[in-house]
Image (spheres, rainbow, N blue to C red):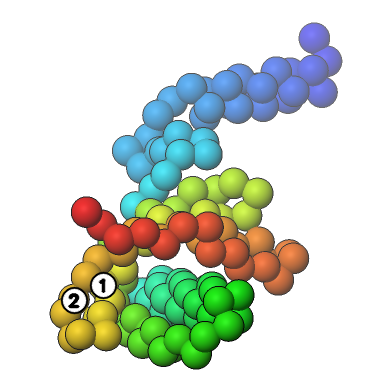
Amino acid sequence: MSKVSLIRLSLLGFLAIAVVTPSAKSTLLGGKSDVGNVRTNIEIQELGRYCVKQFNLQQQSKQGNEASNARTDAAVLSPLKFSRVESAQKQVVAGTKYYLRIAVTQPDGTSRMFDSVIVIQPWLFSKKLLEFTPVA
């Protein structure tokens, strides 16, 4: 056996062992993983703030369309106010998908939790809010 063949065989064996051997921190490829230190993670907190802002913009746009269709002057909804992201998970897809549980303050001053899903594709300079739903 040539030296090159032996090196290739060794590398192939090492790769097989690395792929098959689970580690303590391994996650399923494409699976969700928890984001640590959510409350102090500035990037995650900014994503939560962005989700609330996008939701408020969508609600204002929807209300504006409904008002123009009805030809009435509807009162503008008071927006939700971002408080903090309570928990976060991420998943590698075509970009990174984040699952955030966000605490907000409602217009009446009460707190409420929302689940949010956002996809970020940095190479496209894209952030897209997919879901923003109240926790039951």
Residues at discs 2 and 1 in contact (Cβ within 8 Å): yes
- Residue underneath mark 2: 111
Q: Is residue 48 above or below residue 81?
A: above
| Three-letter amino acid code of the residue under disc 2 | Ser
Q: Which residue of the protein is positioned furthest toward the top in this rendering?
A: 1
The residue lying at 52 percent from left, 39 percent from top is 30
Residue 10 position in % (x across, y down): 65, 22
Residue 3 position in % (x across, y down): 80, 21
- Residue underneath mark 1: 103
Identify which residue, 74 or 109, lies in the foreground. 74
The C terminus is located in which quarter?
bottom left
Residue 44 position in % (x across, y down): 41, 71
Graded by Cα atoms within 10 Å as few (under 14), some (14 to 19) or many (20 or more), the crowding at tag 1 reads many
Residue 64 position in % (x across, y down): 55, 81
In the picture, residue 80 is in which quadrant?
bottom left
Identify which residue, 90 or 110, lies in the foreground. 110
The residue lying at 67 percent from left, 68 percent from top is 126
User: In the shown orientation, is residue 136 left or right of residue 128?
Assistant: left
User: In the shown orientation, is residue 81 left or right of residue 93?
Assistant: left
Residue 88 in view in this figure: no
